[in-house]
Amino acid sequence: MTAASPPEVLRAPLIVEFPFTRSLGPVQSAFLTGLREGVVLGVKTSGGKVMVPPVEYDPVTAEEIRELVEVAATGTVTTWAWNDSPRSQQPLDNPFAWVLVKLDGADTALLHALDAPGPDAVRTGMRVRVRWAPERTGAITDIACFEPYDGPVGGAAVPHDGGFAGAVTGIVAEARLDYVYSPGRAQTAYIEALSERRTVGERCPSCHKVYVPPRGACPTCGVATTDRVEVGPAGTVTTFCIVNIKAKNLDIEVPYVYAHIALDGAGLALHGRIGGIPYDQVRMGLRVEPVWTEGGRYPDHYRPTGEPDADYDAYKELI
C-alpha cells in the first residue's frame, strides 16, 4: 500500500504597496528643487560640518539647521558594494556598485549607484561625478547615478539661499514590495478547508489550545501542532470596532463593524466583518455565523445567529 503524498503547499505572488504623500520642509524642499536644477545643496551645522544629504536637525546637538550651502557634483568613494543582479526600479538595469560618495565640500557621504564596467573598476578613494538624469523632476532620481571622473577636485562649500522658481513642496513616496508568499503547510490546509466552507485549526499537543488560523507550531509551548480540529462555524463576538472611513477599492458602505470572533472550539479569536444587523447594535457576546458568497473562498461577513448572547465568562479569556 502506497502512502498518500502530502498536499502541495500553496505559493502565490504578493505585492505590498503603500504610496503616500509627504510635505517637505524648507531644507528638503531646497535640496530636491536644487537637484532638479542640477545643483547639490547641503546644510552647515553650527560646528561647521557640511552635511549632504541635508538634515533639518543637527544629529549631535539636536539644533535646527537652516544654513544652506552648495557643494560640487564631484566627489570621492568612501566605501562600496557590487550589485551583480539589479532589481526592478533600481537606478541602473546593468550590474553596478552601490557607493557612498563624499562630495567635494561635504563632510558626510551620499548613497547612490556608480556605473562601472565591473567590480575590478571600483575602489575606495576613486573619484566620481554626478551623471544627471536627462529629465529632472525634483527627486533623488534626478541623479541618475555616479560615473568615474578624473578631473580636478571641487572647491569648498559656498553659501546658497535655496531660492528656486517653482520649488518642490511635496513628494509621493512609492513604498512597494514584490515577493512570492507561501503560507506553509498549516495555513495551506486552512485555506483549502475554507474553499470547502469549513474552518480548520490545529491543537497544541501540550497546552491543547486550538489555533485558528493554524501556525504550524504553538508559540507558547514551542512544539509542532499537527492535530487538525474543525471549529465553528458559529462563534462569539469578543471585541469590535466601528469603521467610519471608507477604504479605497473596498465596496462596503460606512459605517460598518469589524470584530474579533471566537469560533466555537477555537482557542483564540479571528477577525471578520459583521453584517445583517445595525452597526450600533453589535455588542460583545453577540452570537454570529459566517455568510458565504457564491464562489467565495472565505466568509464574506458574519451575521447574528439569533441565539442568546454568550455569557462573558465563556469568552473573557479570548479577548
Image (tube, rainbow, N blue to C red):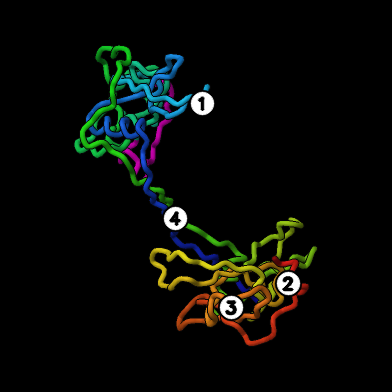
Q: Quadrant of residue 34?
A: top left
Residue sitting nearer the eye, 7 or 304: 304
Residue sitting nearer the eye, 147 or 164: 164
Up-down relation of residue 86 to residue 67 (above or below) = below
Label 1, secondary structure: give it.
loop
Residue occupying the point 60% across, 68% down: 240
**Do labels 3 and 4 touch, CB within 8 Å?**
no
Name the mark nearer the viewer: 1 or 3.
3
Q: Which disc, if any, is residue 281?
A: 3
Name the mark nearer the viewer: 3 or 4.
3
Residue 259 percent coordinates (x, y): 59, 70
Kindly identify the amino acid type of the residue bearing the numbered disc 4.
Answer: Val
Left or right: residue 292 versus residue 313 is left
Q: CA distance from mark 4 to mark 1?
A: 34 Å
Q: Quadrant of residue 214?
A: bottom right
Whichever of callouts 2 and 4 sits on the residue coming sooner in the sequence is: 4
Q: Which disc, if any, is residue 62?
A: 1
Label 4, secondary structure: give it.
strand
Q: Where is mark 2, residue-wise?
A: 315
Residue 112 percent coordinates (x, y): 36, 31
Whichever of callouts 2 and 1 sits on the residue coming sooner in the sequence is: 1
